[in-house]
Amino acid sequence: MAQGVPQRGCVPASLCAKTISQYIHLVQDLTNQSTLTRMNDKLIKEILGSEDSLAAFFTFCEQEQTVRDKLMERMGAQLD
């Protein structure tokens, strides 16, 4: 061991893994590469991947308000 260099202890593996994970998430957030962004990118790629997918997407968009209304009815019934 070099003279004057303090000896360091081992860092527990779980702490090391948690720190690395937090660092990765921080870098992704700072570079706008969050999980949500990647998921949205993948979803857009799938929608644009074929004419059938695109048609299904537009059909869904046309029914969005109907779906929202049904969800509100269901939630209202649960509150009663």
Image (cartoon, rainbow, N blue to C red):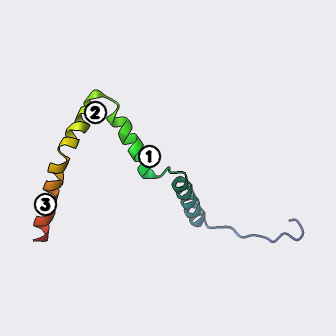
The extreme top residue here reads 51
Q: Is residue 76 above or below residue 42?
A: below
Q: Which residue is identified by label 3?
A: 74
Q: Which sits in the foreground, 23 or 18?
A: 23
Nearer to us: label 2 or label 3: 2
Q: Residues within 10 Å of mark 3 (few under 14, many from 20)?
A: few
Label 3 element class: helix
Residue type at tag 2: Leu
For the C terminus, which image quadrant? bottom left
Q: Which residue is identified by label 1?
A: 38
Q: Which mark is residue 27?
A: none
Disc 2 from disc 1: Cα separation: 19 Å
Mark 3 touches mark 1? (CB < 8 Å):
no
Percent x, y of residue 48: 34, 33
- In the image, taking residue 29 as reference, residue 11 lies left or right, namely right
Residue type at tag 1: Arg
Label 2 element class: helix
Disc 2 from disc 3: Cα separation: 29 Å
Mark 2 touches mark 1? (CB < 8 Å):
no
Q: Which residue is identified by label 2?
A: 54
Mark 2 touches mark 3? (CB < 8 Å):
no
Percent x, y of residue 42: 40, 41
Image label count? 3
Looking at the image, is mark 3 or mark 1 earlier in the sequence? 1
Q: Is residue 66 above or below residue 43?
A: below
At x 56%, y 65%, the residue is 14
Percent x, y of residue 65: 17, 50
- In the image, taking residue 2 as reference, residue 74 lies left or right, namely left
At x 38%, y 36%, the residue is 45
Q: Residues within 10 Å of mark 2 (few under 14, many from 20)?
A: some
Percent x, y of residue 55: 24, 32
Looking at the image, is mark 2 or mark 3 earlier in the sequence? 2
